[in-house]
Amino acid sequence: MFKEIRNKYIRYSSILLYCIIVFFCALQLNFLWLFGYSPSKKDIQTPTLRVGSELYTSDGKLIGRYYKENRTPVNFNEIAPSVIKALVATEDVRFYQHMGIDFRSLLSSGISTATGDRRGASTITQQLAKNLYRTRYNKSQGLLSRIPLLRTLVPKLKEWLTAVKLESNYSKNDILTMYLNTVSFGNNAYGIKTASRVYFDKETNELSVPEAALLVGMLKGTSLYNPIKNPEKAMERRNVALAQMSKYNYITAAQLDSFKNAPIKLKEGRVDEGSDGDSYLRAAVDKYLEKWCKDNGYDLYEDGLKIYTTIDSKLQNYAEEAVAEQMKSLQRRFYNVWGNEDPWQDSEKKKVDYPDRAKRNLPIYSLLKKKFANNPDSVDAYFERKKKMKIFTWKGDRDTIFSTMDSIRYYGKILNTGMMTLDPFNGKIKVWVGGIDHKFFKYDHVKQAKRQAGSTFKPFAYLAALEQGMSPCDKFTDKPVRISYQENGKTEYWEPKNADWNITYREMSLRWAMAKSVNTITAQVTEAVGADNVVKWAHECGIESKLASVPSVSLGPNDVSVYEMVRAYGTFLNDGVRTDPILVEKITDLDDNIIEEFTAKTKRVLSEEISWLMLYMFRGGMEEPGGTSQALWEWDLWKKNNQIGGKTGTSSDYVDAWYMGITKDLVTGVWVGCDERTAHFQNGETGEGSRTALPIFAKFMEKVYKDPSTGYTMGPFPKSKVKITREINCPSPRFEVDTAESDSLAVDSTLFEVPGSEEIQPQQTEQKQEVIQKAEEQKPTEPAKQPEALVPLTKKEERQLRRKQKQEEKEREKGNN
C-alpha cells in the first residue's frame, strides 16, 4: 500500500510511522512474550498501591499495622504546597507543560551525555509509571530482556507509553499525589505521609519549606541523603532543592538565605499512636484472618484494609496495667523464693538440667555437632561465647554481655502470663494479653499455649452431676477415696489427697465442695457421673483440646488454653448458649466501605436452669465458708450488691496457676507460670492460683469498675428466667476455725497471709455479710425454705472488727482535737 505514495519522503515517513505504531502495539500486547507485562487500560484506571492494612480497636483507636512497605496514602489537599513546589522545582520543572514525556529535556540530556555529563531525563510521570507498575522488575520483562541493550531500552519505552496513558487519564495534581504516595523515603517509610511522621512527627500539611526540601532531596538517594545516617549530605542536598525552588521563583532570595542556614531538626515519630506493629494482638488477628484472606483473595500486607477488632481499648489498657503490676511483683517473689538456687526440678524435687536440654533443642546445636564431631569442646565454647545483647527486665530493656547459655538460664526463670476477657452474649473478645512482652516472648499464652488447667476444670464434673439430676444441695462426705482404673491391662488405684493432707469427714453440699475445691469430693462426683461425661460436657461447653478420660480428669491434668477455658465458662453466663469468640468485628477498604462483618456462631448446649445453677455454684467461691475466691475481699469490688463467681486452679507442683472470673457482663481467664514447666514455686503460699493469677483479675476489674466511661458497672447476676426445680437452699455451717483451702491438682488451696500482700480492709467483714445476705435474697422461690442460722464471726473477722473500732475511735479523737 505504501507503493501508491509517489513522494518517497512521505512514503518513507509513513512506513516509519507505521512501524512505530506496530512496535508500540506489540510492546503493549507483549507480542510473542518478547516485551513482558505492560499496564492495561484497567490497570491505569485503577492503579493499586501496596498499602498496608490498619488495625483498630472497637472504639476506633489505631493499634497496629500490617505492611511490606510502610505506607499510608494521602490526598492532594493534605499535602503542604511547599512539598509540591520543591518536587516540581527539583525533579521536573516543566511538569505542567509536557504530556508525560519531556522531549526538550530528552534532547538536553542527550547532548549532556554525549559531552560526558550524564544526566537523567525522566519526568515525574515516568517515575510514577516505574514505581506504580514496577516496569523494571522481572515480572515486567520479556524475552528481549536477555539482550544487553534492549534490556534497558524496552523498559524505558514502556515507561514512556505508560506515562502518556497516565497523563491522559489523570490530572496533574492526581499524578503528583500518586507519585508522593508511592516513593520511598528510606527507614521503611513509603509515601510522603509516612515520611513526615517518621522524620518530623508531623502531618503532611504541617511541613515547613526546609522540611519539604529535605524530604524531596532524599528522593535522589534515600541512603546517601538520609538525615539520620548522613546529616551533612542530607543538608547539602536540601540546600540544592532550596536553590532550585529559588531559581524558579517558588521562594525569594531572602528566604533561601534564611532556610539554607537553618539546622536540620528531626523529631522521630510513628505512623500511629504508640503502635510499632509488634504485639500479641496483631499476631492473633493475622492468624484469625488467615483463612478469610485466602478465601476472599486479600493480602493483609498490601491491600490497605481497615480491620476493626472487638478489643475495647480501655479494658485492654487496664488489663495490661494489671498484668504489669502483678507480674513484676511475682517475678520478685520468684527470685526471693529460689535465691541463688536453680529452680528447675521435677515432681520428686530432683534437679533438672534445663539449660543443657534447651541448648540441645536449638537448631544450631545439631549443625555444630556435625561440624565439630571430634571436638565437643568447640560446641560448648560456641554456646559460652559472650556477646552484646538486649534483654527483658521489669525495669526496662537492658543492654548486657551474655552468652547463649546465660540467656537460656536467664529466660528459663522468667514468669509469663496469658489473659483474655470475653463478652459471651455477643462473642466479642474485649481483652487479649498474650504475655508480658511480645518483643522478647513471641509465644502467645492465650491461644497458642496449652497448660494443665488444675482445679479450674472441676466445674465440668459438677456440671455433669447437675445434668444427671443432682442439685447444688446434694451432699458428699470428705473422706479417703480409692478409685480403681485399668492401665495396660492392670488394675491401678488413684487416691487423691486434700491440701493439708487432712480429711475432715464432714458432709458437704456440692456447692460448698466446689467452692472449697475439695479434691476427695470432686473425685467422688467424677466417679459417680463417669469421667467420660466430664469430658463430654467440657467439650460441649467449648473445650476443643483432646482430653484423656481418666479418674483424675476433673482435677485438670489435661492441657488446655486460656481461650478455650474462657469460651467454656462463657457458656455458663450466656444462659447455656456456647458462643464462639470473635476477634474482628468488621473489615473496610481505605474509603471505609464495608467489605465484611463478623458475627459469632452460637449453639445451645445447656438448659437455662442448668446454666443458672452453675453460676450459683460459682458464686459459692465468695459466699461459702472457705471459698477459694475469697482473696477477692482484698480489693474494692463489693459495692452495689456486686457478685463475682470464679474458680482458682493450680496444677501439680505449682507449675500452672489459674483464675477464672465471672461477673454479670464478662468472663476473664488468667494463667500464670514459667514457659519451662520444671521452673515453678515451691508451695501454695507463694505459687497457687489465688496468690498469682487471681490478683491480676482483681486489679483489672477494680480498674474497670472505677472508670464509669467503660460502661461496666457493679451489680448482681441476673435472676433466673426459668423456674428452678432443684434444691438450692442448704446453708453451710460456719465453724470457729475458718480457712480457705489450697487449690491444686494434688493439693487444695489455702488462703495464706503472704508477706507484702495487701491487708484486708476493716469494712470487708460488713461487706462480706451484706453480699452473702443479699445473695440469699436473690435465690428463686422454692418450697420448704428453711431459715439460715445465725453465723458467728471467725476469729479473723473479730480481729478486723476490733481494728475498725479502734480506727473509728482514733478518728473521733482527731475530730475532737
Image: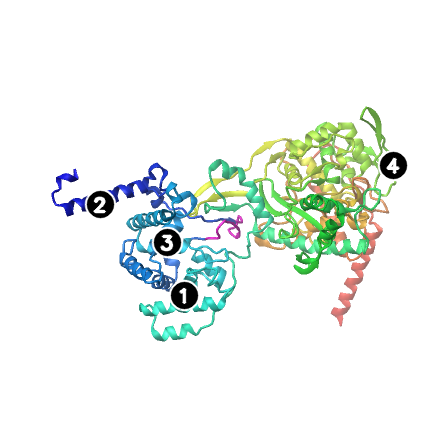
* Local crowd size for mark 1, using a 10 Å CA cut-off: few (<14), some (14–19), many (≥20): many
> 357 and 773: which one is in front?
357
Give me the C-alpha separation between circle 3 and circle 1: 19 Å
Front residue of 163 and 548: 163
> Distance between the Cα atoms at labels 4 and 1?
85 Å
Task: From the image, state whether disc 3 or disc 1 is nearer to you.
Answer: 3
- Kind of residue indicated by mark 2: Leu
Q: Secondary structure at mark 1?
A: helix
| Identity, as a three-letter code, of the amino acid under mark 1 | Ala
Q: Is residue 279 magenta?
A: no
Residue extent of the magenta highlight: 56-71
> Which callout, 3 or 1, points at the residue further toward the start of the chain?
3
Q: Residues within 10 Å of mark 2 (few under 14, many from 20)?
A: few
Q: Is residue 622 visible?
A: no
Q: Which mark is residue 127?
A: 3
Mark 4 or 2: in front is: 2
Relative placement, left or right, of 1 versus 767 is left
The answer for how far apart the CA atoms under marks 1 and 2 are is 42 Å
Q: Which residue is mark 2?
A: 17
Circle 2: element type = helix
The answer to whether mark 3 and mark 1 are in CB contact below 8 A is no
